[in-house]
Image: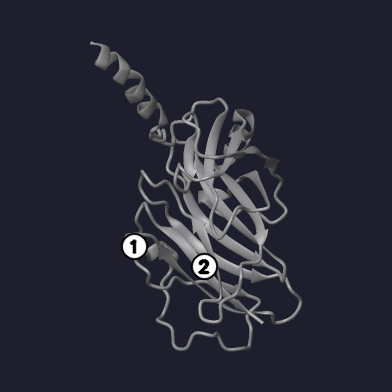
Amino acid sequence: MRLALLALPVALAATLSRPRPAPPLFALPTLPRIRVEATRDHVMVLEDLNLPRGEWQGGDFELFVAFGAPGTPSAVDARLYAAGELGRDPPPDATFEPVALERAARRPPSSYMLLGPPTMAGVLLRVRGASFRRALAPFGIARLRVRALSELPAEDALTGRELVVRLGVREGPPLALGRIEVVSLEPDEWLLGAEAHLCGPDADRYPLAVSVLPRSIRASPRESPPAPIAPVLSVRHATDDLCVRFWTL
């Protein structure tokens, strides 16, 4: 009996330290756009997510977003818009409501898992029920935009500058992925080219179509790459992330 009593706290501690499964979202989001904006000293990754009403009946809720790579961003924010009809992009001048957030070492048990693995560091988005209801009002879909600012990744002559962008919930179905954009905010032809592919233990690494803006007249460092496919047609797994590479002067 004494051995059993001594073993109980150890077993209980192991149970408490084990990460709890993420509660399922009330509706499966989609990722209509991933945009990388680059300058000579920093890079901004924007992830647009469409959040349908689903079974949400009201009340505040929390969403967890894990950081990508190569490191912890220097700044993160989130904005809530009303999506256009059928989940289309809101207009450029659309109004939005800021979403309060705080950094977290891992996903809290009370939050919904939105992007990335639950055991990585990230941010907790606190969405107010009133704000979400207003975003849903026009067409029943809210657009959440998460922006992460980081230093420009180090350059490699062969692989360029690489980023890893989180794509969805590891324990659930993969999120539908729309378009990928890599944009230079510099006034000259500093951005030479870009490519993207899925990465992860089960990933299909076939190249994905990327919109590069502005288009450079210079040749991409890669010679004769395979023809890319639209991201929405790619074979996706729940463990997939997105690897984006770009080359600069």
The residue nearer to you, when weighing 188 against 152, is 152
Expressed as whole percent of the image width and height from the top left, the position of residue 18 reads 38, 33
Q: Is 218 above or below relative to 44?
A: below
The residue nearer to you, when weighing 136 against 67, is 67
Disc 2 versus disc 1: nearer the observer: 2
Specify few, some or many for label 2: CA neighbours under 10 Å numbering under 14, 14-19, or 20 or more: many
Q: Which mark is residue 63?
A: none
Q: Quick one: SS at disc 1? A: loop
N-terminal-most mark, 2 or 1: 1
Q: Which residue is mark 2?
A: 244
Quadrant where the image shows the N terminus:
top left
Amino acid marked by disc 1: Val
Amino acid marked by disc 2: Val
Residue at image point 50% right, 33% down: 108
Expressed as whole percent of the image width and height from the top left, the position of residue 8 reads 31, 18
Residue at image point 57% right, 74% down: 246
The answer to whether residue 125 is seen in the rendering is yes
Q: Which mark is residue 235?
A: 1
**For the view shown, which residue lies furthest in the right direction?**
187
